[in-house]
Image (tube, rainbow, N blue to C red):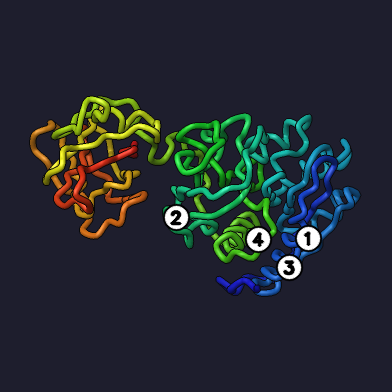
Amino acid sequence: MTGVSQAADPPYRIMVFSKTAGFRHDSIPAGIQALQELGAANSFTVDATEDANAFTTANLANYKAVVFLSTTGDVLNATQQTAFESYIAGGGGYVGVHAAADTEYGWPFYGGLVGAYFHSHPQIQQVTVRVDDRTHPSTSHLPVAWVRTDELYNYQTNPRGGARILARLDESTYSGGNMGADHPIIWCQNYRGGRSWYTGLGHTQQSYAEANFRNSLLGGIRWVAGMVPGDCSPDTQPGPVLLSRGRPATASTVENASYGAGNAVDGNTGSRWSSQFADPQWLSVDLGQNRQVSRVRLQWEAAYGRAYRIEVSANGSSWSTVNTQTASDGGVDDISFTATTARYVRMYGTARATAWGYSLFEFDVYGT
């Protein structure tokens, strides 16, 4: 699979460095091949190496960007580190892929350059990546909710504040995340004279055959190489975060005392709110103050709402509709809408899909 050329850049060279002193990813050859194919379609030449002796001032001057492709451990000596620091200070570009964050723990310059060090990861699984910045060339092509399968890193620190966060992992969509609602996975920054772009994705071989992932890599390379503009100024505020967990909830009715409204905002998918067997029915959550609300996620039990409205209110009495569903088929409904100021958010059901009541495992509200 070749990359689709996005622009006629002037020819340039990048170095792909994949030396490992710890765990070695079997996806490295696939990554090198993907980058070579992207280069052939997009005006850059790829020199792939695992020889740390390539890190000299004279040799690095040949490259617009250096890609650390799932490197691990201590891969450069002090002289090589100094040469790379000078390269970055002179305007060089750095791209870190996946285990690049599991590299050079004793080199503070590198820790700042990559943005955050690896902490841990759960097993490979499907996740929804929330793309917060759809203007940067590495993420402009991605959907707001990007569903994919990969190994999902936790980090020792959050790079927000020093870097610009382009995309985050939604920890409510997989198991094993430990960073909470603000879990960066793609970011970029201007760093000590140079440019840095990092993605925590890319563990699997299959990633490098995925068009969205390949084009994200391409955008990152083109940005650090200075071929395309992109805002990588630090941001201090996360994108939409989960606001409803543990907040007071009320409902029109409950089937019985075991199925109260609070079950839908307790973070426990084994408990649920269940209404009486009639239409209409509603469940509302109080966020405690006015917030900018932009997304709800409903996880239905087998008895679900076929038709319902998502409504918001500043006072709990006057409601405005921000989204209408007419043909839900149950399971998980993940709904994004234009950010709206609200303290109260509710699901107002107008048509049950079964003879039973509305039954929600979780009603998650996101915003800022």
Amino acid at circle 2:
Arg
Residue, disc 3: 36
Residue, disc 2: 134
Which comes sooner in the sequence, label 1 or label 3? 1
Amino acid at circle 4:
Gln
Distance between mark 4 and mark 2 Cα atoms: 24 Å
Distance between mark 3 and mark 4 Cα atoms: 16 Å
Element at label 4: helix
- Residue 200, image x and y in percent? 62, 46
Residue, disc 1: 29
Element at label 2: loop
Answer with the quarter of the image where residue 78 lies: top right
Rendered residue at 88%/48% (across/down): 52
Answer with the quarter of the image where residue 9 lies: bottom right
Residue, disc 4: 206
Rendered residue at 71%/58% (across/down): 64
Camera-near label (1 vs 3) is 1
Distance between mark 4 and mark 1 Cα atoms: 12 Å
Which comes sooner in the sequence, label 2 or label 1? 1
The answer to whether residue 226 shows anywhere in this view is: no
